[in-house]
Image (tube, rainbow, N blue to C red):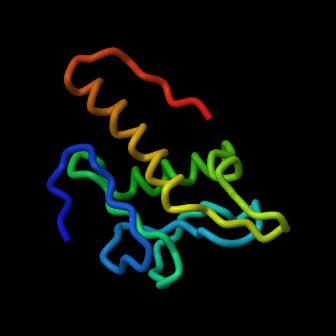
């Protein structure tokens, strides 16, 4: 599946054609950790046309390091889950920011 949009990130579970995957279950330390090996229980991400997949991967490493995924983790025990809707929300906001900058709009900052 090719992503024809300039800014739209494709986020799916059990997505073997993704550029990389996020760990969506586990401890807070591992939650949202990007990996490059497919497993059907991970959440796959396909980068937009204008985003190099390695940049997208390291962007997710950065998101994990600053705690974006930790704040999105849900669960009442030490075993947390990352909802696909939360992952999509983060990347939709990022897409809107890139779209506005590309089209000469105002700069929008993502805050979590």
Q: Could you tell me which residue is drawn at 34 percent across and 34 percent down?
A: 96
Using the image as rendered, state which of residue 105 and residue 64 is in the foreground: 105
The vertical placement of 99 against 61, above or below, is above
Where is residue 79 drawn, in percent x and y? 78, 71
The vertical placement of 39 against 60, above or below, is below
Q: Could you tell me which residue is drawn at 29 percent across and 24 percent down?
A: 101
Q: Could you tell me which residue is drawn at 35 percent across and 80 percent down?
A: 16
Instruction: Report the residue that reaches farthest toward the left.
Output: 4
The vertical placement of 98 against 10, above or below, is above
The quadrant where residue 112 appears = top right
Instruction: Report the residue that reaches farthest toward the right.
Output: 77
Using the image as rendered, state which of residue 61 and residue 72 is in the foreground: 72
The quadrant where residue 28 appears = bottom right
**Which quarter of the rendering shows the N terminus?**
bottom left
Where is residue 87 drawn, in percent x and y? 50, 54
Q: Could you tell me which residue is drawn at 70 percent across and 52 percent down?
A: 70
Where is residue 45 drawn, in percent x and y? 39, 63
The quadrant where residue 25 appears = bottom right
* Relative horizontal placement of residue 44, taking residue 33 as reference (left or right): left
Where is residue 91 drawn, in percent x and y? 42, 47
Q: How many marks?
A: 0
Using the image as rendered, state which of residue 80 and residue 51 is in the foreground: 80
């Amino acid at each position: 599946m090719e992503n024809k949009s300039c800014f739209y990130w494709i986020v799916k579970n059990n997505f073997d054609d993704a550029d990389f995957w996020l760990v969506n279950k586990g401890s807070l330390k591992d939650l949202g950790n990007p990996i490059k090996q497919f497993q059907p229980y991970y959440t796959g991400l396909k980068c937009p046309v204008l985003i190099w997949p390695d940049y997208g991967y390291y962007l997710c490493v950065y998101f994990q390091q600053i705690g974006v995924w930790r704040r999105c983790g849900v669960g009442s025990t030490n075993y947390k889950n990352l909802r696909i809707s939360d992952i999509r929300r983060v990347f939709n906001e990022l897409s809107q920011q890139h779209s506005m900058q590309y089209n000469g709009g105002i700069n929008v900052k993502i805050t979590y």
